[in-house]
Amino acid sequence: MLLLLKSGISWKDLSDLAKEKFVTVATDAFGIRGRPTNLSRVAILSGLDRREVARLRRRAREQRTAPQGYMSKPTQLLHAWYHDLRYLDPSGKPRDLEIEGEDGSFAELVRRYAPGIPLVAMIKELRTAGAIADVDGKRLRALKRSYIPRDLNENLVRLWGSELQDLGTTCEHNLYRDQADPPRFDRRAISLRVDPKSLPQFREMLEREGQAFLERMDDWITAHELDAGSDEQGTGMRVGVGVYHIQDHVSRVKRKQARSAPHTAD
């Protein structure tokens, strides 16, 4: 949740995305003889009513040809500032807007694209995010096209997302695999009673040993890759391994539990 909030994703954005994904997966993965799952069964599986399922299916079909993505209200506001003719100058760039007023003001922009959010609160939040700047104390200037509360590197966010997806896919495989299908390696080494003073040593060892392990795995993976010419039909598989650092604070309840099981490797 912390990463979502820092990235400007609201609970409504997450809720809308989750509902759409529930419908998409239920439609694609639970049909009979390769056909899409019918409307009633998707409603039962997802917990959504039939009307909502039908709406989300239509939206998914539309997004396959014209994806719109998910935008928070501040991002919708900034997007409009860069595209709505009411807020552009003759050259097509976002013009500086009077804070108060009816037509073409920032207050009107908020009412139109972020209804329900107080004007002062929106200005304060966008200022903090570095998305707008004051001009002469009476007008506001757009500096960014999207709202991100904390300055995050977009490529890092994509990388973290792909890592979470890989871990989730492995867990899903191990939970629901056929008996004939071997499990995928998924292990951890954890203690709830590590001395905080030893953390620098742990980081150093993990960097050294983890990097050496990944380099050995990378050599093995590279040696078993198909030649570029022989993989034209897409017969190759995506295979790899990930190593990550686990660290958080332990509650008093967990500390009491740890006395009987101070170390685990599972």
Image (tube, rainbow, N blue to C red):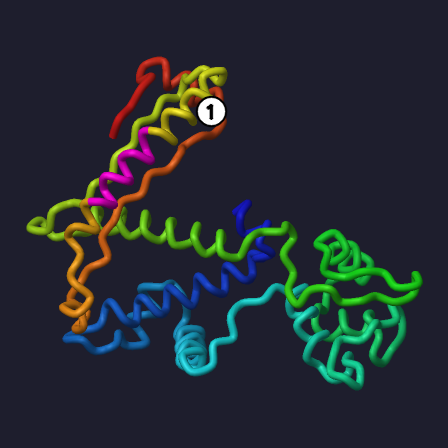
Residue carrying label 1: 250
Say whether residue 212 is magenta.
yes
Say whether residue 56 is magenta.
no
Q: Position of residue 128 (x, y in %)?
A: 74, 52
Q: Position of residue 165 (x, y in %)?
A: 35, 53
At x 51%, y 59%, the residue is 14
Q: Which picture quadrant has residue 41?
A: bottom left
10 Å crowding of disc 1: few (<14), some (14-19), many (20+) = few
Three-letter code for the amino acid on which mark 1 is drawn: Val
At x 42%, y 23%, the residue is 254
Q: Is residue 43 left or right of residue 122?
A: left
Of 210 and 57, nearer the camera is 210
Q: Which residues are magenta?
A: 209-219
The local secondary structure at tag 1 comes to loop
Q: Which picture quadrant has residue 218?
A: top left
What predominant SS class does the magenta segment belong to?
Answer: helix
Q: Is residue 210 above or below residue 40?
A: above
At x 84%, y 72%, the residue is 97
At x 16%, y 63%, the residue is 227
Q: Is residue 225 left or right of residue 80?
A: left
